[in-house]
Amino acid sequence: MQVLVSGLLLGGIYAVISIGLTLIFGVTRIINFAHGEFLMLAMYGTFWLFTSYGMDPYVSLLIVTPAMFLVGLVAQRAVIQPILGAAPLMQIFATVGLSVAMQNAALLVWHADYRTIRTSYSTSVLEVFGLVVSIPRLAAFGVAAAMALGFFFLFKYTYLGKALRAVAQDRRSAMLMGINVQRIYLLSFGIGTACVGVAGAMLMPIYYTFPTVGTYFVLTAFVVVVLGGMGSMMGACVGGLIIGVIEAFSGFFIAPALKEAVYFVIFILMLLFRPSGLFGQRGAEEVGLK
Amino acid sequence: MSTLRRLGEPRIYLPLLAVLIIILAPLAIESPFYLHVLVMILFYAALSQAWNIIGGYGGQLSLGHAAFFGIGSYASTLLFLQSGLSPWIGAILGGLLAMGTAFAISYPCFRLHGPFFTLSTIAFGEVIRILAIYFRDITRGSVGLQIPFQPSLAHFVFRDKASYLYVALGYLVLTTAVTWWIERSKLGHALVALREDEDAAEAVGINTHWAKLTAVMVSAFLTALGGVFYSQFVLFIEPYSVFSGDLSIQIAMVAIIGGIGTVSGPIIGSFIVTPVSEFARAWLGGSYRGLHFLVYGLVLIVVVILIPRGVGEWLRAPYRRLIRRLPGWRPVEAPPPAAVPAVPFTPVAAGGNGYLLECRQVSKYFRGLAALHQVDLTVRQGEILGLIGPNGAGKSTLFNTITSFYPPDKGQILFAGRPITGIRPPHRIIRLGIGRTFQVVKPFTNVTALENVVVGAFCRTTDAGQARAEAAHILEMVGMGQKMDVLARSLTLADRKRLELARALATRPQLLLLDEVMAGLNSTEVTEMIALVRRIRESGISILVIEHVMHVIMSLCDRIVVLHHGEKIAEGTPAGVSADRRVIEAYLGEEYLIA
């Protein structure tokens, strides 16, 4: 039970990261290999705000998230926009290049040290029915749930949400319906990046940051997104929780060192036998490629 | 022409000169550091060349090649440390092990396309690295393995850098020769075709899955050799260095910066990229770790956006000009004028009842929508059968069921009396003698018209010369003799349709399925096309043709079958069908009857 709870709480974070990834893929049909590096940036941002200004990570959320939104806009304009019509091969390489550049820029500026921040509540726990629940993890889970709910309403009830869905389904028809598709691409990238802004701030009290931290999380996010279904919000949330639980259990029962191997195997099996994922539309994974 | 005379040509002696310069380099370069840099340049060029086979030619972007590299490294090192086996032999065994691994990994993963394939290669790379760390009883985990410094040829350990330089050079020459050979072979053409369009590749009889598997296995073997070289050069290996994701990325990056899918690309790329990292490491030391990868990343983005075909693309024209000015230059001699084999046509005997193709009660459903419902259709030997019907009637779907792109849900299809229902994948149907075109043309856009058709001709031969001669002959026949060297993407629609037809013809079909080859052509072009289709029939090929242009159908076809909402509503002679009340209602409209 304890394992299940800690797995679920961890899964919340994965869900937030994956929502951003899946949103970008759903709308632009580009898999952003640099997604993890944006997370890394957000974590350093939070770290810096804390150490320089003593700002609480949960407060800095309000600064880091919009900042990451802007970073996303800039990255989209500079790197993603020019390759929208390019061959899939080139699209992969452009974001891989972005990822490599950001990772190593961080290595250059901040060196390879692991950095963490100590807050008064970093290690504080709550005991409910004999279960030990870490408070910052619980907070992270709460924020994740709130975000998922927020996205649900955004997509269902706002013009922007509907436009996003329309572009995701068929960019040409959406264009004919008077939707500014370029703007939607830009916004989706911004929003997707803002998601890792939130995730970064929520992670900082419980995790440490280093230049390649993004690789670790983004690979997990890929697993989540494939499990849940490419482009599906619901899938990202549920997939995140499932992977969190799987990770906790395999770490507990098999061997901590092998937990990544376990979910990569799940990932590959999933890709092979049900590439549309748990909630994805069948064939959705092909749409952007053919 | 004698080999000796060919040595006098710049295109031959220039590369040989380059090799000679590298062989003599140790005499001029005294600093071990510069020699080291040169070794690394050759080493990365060779690795990247190995990757290029599947990543560049085949377009299957693997970011997990470090797995093969590491397998080679560990296999030879462990064999040497535990049983004293010479790494030279260990290299072969490691290569074979990597090949086996590549087969096991890729067999399922090649069902994935584009970024999904890339993701799966990353995942596999990670899994193998994690396993290498985990099974420390065998690999000694993160501690790594040390190879004792006992210089000898048998141990593949040398005191001087020059020896390593020669091994690296040999490695590069080997990978380049293999790539060069593949580029000209049937396999190379298959890879380029499937990179450009997998469906179209199947439609000219290419076993795409087999082609990808062969390529990745060759690539894995050569990559593993690189792993062996690395471990013998550095004399120390650990999972984080030989299985690292950064290595996978670097291998691919070198090729893309130089130009993927070309023999020269990885070599050019390595001469540009590798010195950056080696000099950055030496001059800036540990304090600027990451700088060279930062530069790589930025260069990669710029190259992808501005020169997606790589830096090699810039150098090609100046290189050609240089070659022309050098002594001994002669224009390329045209291949001996098409000794076109009178297409060895062994017309298959039609089925016992005289039918070449027979569809019995064929049905195809898409989620409850009956695209085809119990369709009976027969094509007699030597006839032109027209297939008409309003948009959405199921005509193209019928083509797709016959050629197994969508196998039928119910019913039977016989070709020359033999059941072919559900024989998959499509290339097997094509090889039986059914050629097809696509309604939306699918040329291999980044290669020339000739190469497009050569790919088709390879369906029946493995001889490159014969394939070229046949392809040229067919292009002449469809009236594109003047446009053989034009890239397919710059052809007009009419030419693309002709090209599509030529490519299908090159597979030497008995039965040709033509899907709206006249749509979008002007009246002159239509007239030409009609004449062409008639000529094809006269050569003994039976034809099933989908067409909307009514006068074409009426003048071309011996018989006509009409589909409507997935069902056959009429069949008969052009005159008979056009008088049929149901057909008029469903399709032609009153005006046609009056006219």
Image (spheres, coloured by chain):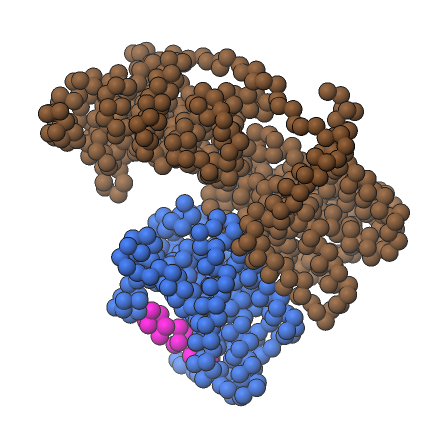
Chain colours: A blue, B brown
On screen, residue B438 above or below A244: above
Where does the C terminus of chain A fall, quadrant-wise?
top left
Left or right of B191 on screen, residue B316: right
Res. B79 visible in picture: no
On screen, residue B361 above or below A99: above
In the rendered image, residue A136 lying in the magenta stretch gets the answer yes
A151 and B284: which one is in front? B284
Left or right of B60 on screen, residue A289: left
Q: How many labels does the image show?
A: 0
- To which quarter of the image does residue B539 belong? top left
Residue B477 image position (x, y, % from top left): 45, 20
Residue B468 image position (x, y, % from top left): 55, 24
B522 and B89: which one is in front? B522
Where does the N terminus of chain A fall, quadrant-wise?
bottom left
Q: Which residue is drawn at 48% across and 68% down?
A: A74
Q: Residue at x 84, y 50 (%)?
A: B161
In the rendered image, residue B64 lying in the magenta stretch gets the answer no
Q: Residue at x 23, y 21 (%)?
A: B554
Chain part drawn in magenta: A135-151
B401 and B4: which one is in front? B4
Residue A246 image position (x, y, % from top left): 46, 63
Q: Which residue is drawn at 82% across and 39% down?
A: B20
Left or right of B483 on screen, residue B268: right
A270 and B281: which one is in front? B281
Dominant SS in magenta: helix
On screen, residue B305 above or below A70: above
